[in-house]
Amino acid sequence: MSNEQRELAIAQYQAGQLAFERGEYKTAVGCFEKGANLAPANSSLGGDIRLWLVNAYSAANREEEAISLCETLARYPDLDIRKQGKQLLYILKAPRLKLKPEWQTKIPVLSRLDQGDGPSTLRQYTPPTPTSTQVARPIPEPEDLSTMNLQDNGFLWVALVGGGLILGGLLWWG
């Protein structure tokens, strides 16, 4: 692998990470695929790019390709890449749970923050209203310590002496 190819692979890798973090999964897949083609398949860089590609495939709803690539990574020569590939494969093959809409939280789109439109986007977000199954519990008021009797009433000492006598009696007879 030439130095120029390595730098191009790294550039595609970084561009893919940036696109992935912005939620642009199709763009991320394209960048990671280009980077994977430039980096040798058995190198550490190639493995890292392919791990990110698995995540991008999964995020872009291309599960079959993600699983196929994970199966390849599970036999990778680098131990760390192989271990992560097996872990991702386990996650991707796990059964999917059905989620009720009230279990999910809607997250506002934050992609416009870099463009200066962020505050207006955030102002448009309204949190979900509680459903009838969700009961709001009142928060109890803290108690005023000045109204409480905080003096020792001696019960603890009576209980300790009584317990000691019982234990002593058992030891003496036993």
Image (cartoon, helix red, strand yellow):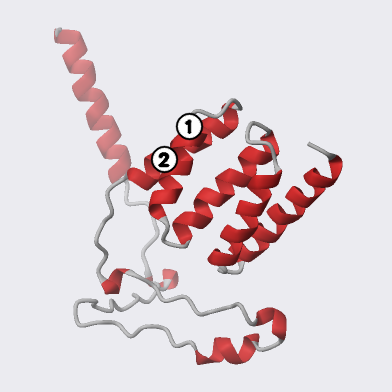
Q: What amino acid is labelled 1 in the image? A: Ala
- Quadrant showing the N terminus: top right
Q: Are marks 1 and 2 in contact (CB under 8 Å)?
A: yes
**Disc number for residue 74:** 1
Residue depicted at 37% across the width and 77% down the height: 141
Residue depicted at 57% across the width and 69% down the height: 24
From the viewer's side, name the closer residue of 80 and 54: 54
Residue depicted at 43% across the width and 42% down the height: 68
- Mark 1 lies on a secondary structure that is loop
- Mark 2 lies on a secondary structure that is helix
Q: Quadrant of residue 156?
A: top left
From the viewer's side, name the closer residue of 15 and 22: 15
Give the image location of residue 49, x and y in percent.
63, 46
Give the image location of residue 121, x and y in percent.
57, 88
Q: Is residue 33 left or right of residue 89?
A: right
Mark 1 and mark 2: Cα distance apart in space: 8 Å
Q: Is residue 77 left or right of residue 106?
A: right
**Residue to which mark 2 is pinned:** 89
Is residue 116 depicted above or below 7 in this figure?
Answer: below
